Amino acid sequence: MHPRTQLAVIAAHIALTACHLAGRPGSSLPGRIALKIDPHIVSPLAAQVRSGIIVTCGTNGKTTTSNLLCSALEAQGFRVVSNRLGANMKEGVAAALSTAADPLGHLDADFACLEIDEASAVHILQYLQPDYMIITNLFRDQLDRYGEIDLTMKALEEAIRLAPSMTLVINGDDPLTAFLAKKSGHRVVTFGVSEKVAGAGATEDVSSGEVRESRFCENCGASLKYEFYHFSQLGVYHCPSCGFGRPAINYDACGVRLSPELSLDVIESGAATVDSSSPQKIKPAFRESTAAPVRISAPMTGFYNVYNILAVYSVLRELLLPADKLNEVLRDYKPQFGRGEVFHVGQNSEQKILLNLAKNPAGFNQNIAAMLQDRSAKDLIIVINDNAQDGRDVSWLWDVDFDRLADDTIRSITVSGLRALDMQLRLKYVEIESVCAPTVEEAIARCLADGCGNLYVLVNYTALYEAHRYLEGIQK
């Protein structure tokens, strides 16, 4: 190990200790300091991972998917290094690897499960060679940072080229993700849901005004035809002009139930590989289909978690590992840092608060759909900031189906954050009343004092940190 790398690792450990003493998680700062000392620190540390590196990209679901996979591998006795708190840029990856190593720079890990920001992927894959990349979905997100969705696709395409032997594990229900994977020429494994699911979040009318990121075929530009949507552009689709369409699904969910808890059957039809004579074609190969569906259940909400679970299941099976412990992992899984995280407060912990990150139209619509599956009375807080990490442009609020909040179970709506008045105006346009609170702490305190004991808090990026810190404090 180069002395500079060892020094960088020691500095990262010192920074992590300082962060913890200051009450901060230390998910990025140790990596930022390590990279100042050794800009290439990711390479020698990642090279020590013995069995495989799995990276997770995509607009929504990265943190949950990566963390679930990490827990599933740990449940089978493997040592796993992961950026569990969702610090997914180069600094976060460097922090995860360097703080997991000992002071001499030795990393004892069978697997690395690393969540990676799409725009940062090209800067990270220069220094590590993943065995698998999960791509959860591609939606419009933070226009002033990512630009339109085609720029995100180009950034990922460039990153994928840096790892020619990497297998792509993709959401086949997303035409953007499917096209990107097929175009890459890499080996491809697909997961998806081939049956229409009641309550998934899509409006019934396929010609409705719901925002779809991919109305046109990426291959030829013609309008895509859908049998049905799950939500946004995810569904069963094909292009009548050029023949591009939803690929054969290797890990297919059926019998999906969203309540009282999430459950599904997974049907395996073998791994997939790209036909070298036609990069646009996926053909099944490698392993025979399983004899019977595998039943999976989880105490989770939201149709989007079906995809997260399918992604994890797919990677486990591609690693030729059994999935028999996945149900146990899902039962014991504790959501991290505002990804469906539940807090209990009050003298007898009688008040429940669910904290969820909602940062783009597709994610917000899915959060609303999941919340409305709970038919008990509830209060709602929406916190919108426009700091640099959030994206300065909040015009995406007008693409969210907020009219669905006119539901009898929602007792009150409170808005807060730097763009609270924008949020209040958006609700006014769909004739939904709300009150404004100057801070997220005051918003939560009001709802706890005069609420129904069932509180949902939907926040974007920087609001997540202040909300989480406050909720952790009052829970303790």
Image: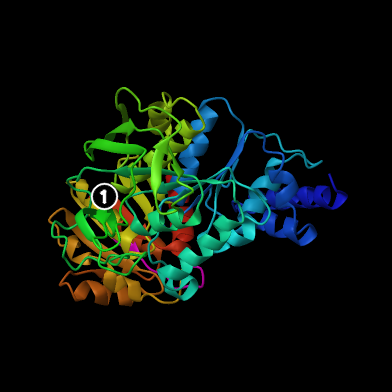
The answer to whether 455 appears left or right of 104 in the picture is left
Residue at 16% over, 53% down: 409
447 inside magenta stretch: no
Q: Main secondary structure of the magenta part?
A: loop
Residue at 14% over, 58% down: 407
Query: Up-down: is 35 above or below 392?
Result: above
Q: Which one is nearer the viewer's eye here, 204 or 427?
A: 204
Query: Up-down: is 69 above or below 200?
Result: above
Q: Quadrant of the N terminus?
A: top right
State which quadrant residue 408 falls in.
bottom left
Q: Position of residue 142 (x, y in %)?
A: 43, 70
Query: Up-down: is 43 above or below 331?
Result: below
Residue at 30% over, 54% down: 245
Residue at 22% over, 37% down: 257
Residue hosting label 1: 370
The answer to whether 74 appears left or right of 62 in the picture is right
Amino acid on which the number 1 mark rests in the picture:
Ala
Q: Position of residue 405 (x, y in %)?
A: 19, 61
- Range covered by the magenta-colored residues: 381-389
Judged from this view, the residue extending furthest toward the front is 277
| Res. 445 in view | no
Q: Which one is nearer the viewer's eye here, 326 or 16?
A: 326
How crowded pointer 1 is (Cα within 10 Å; few <14, some 14-19, many 20+) is rated as some
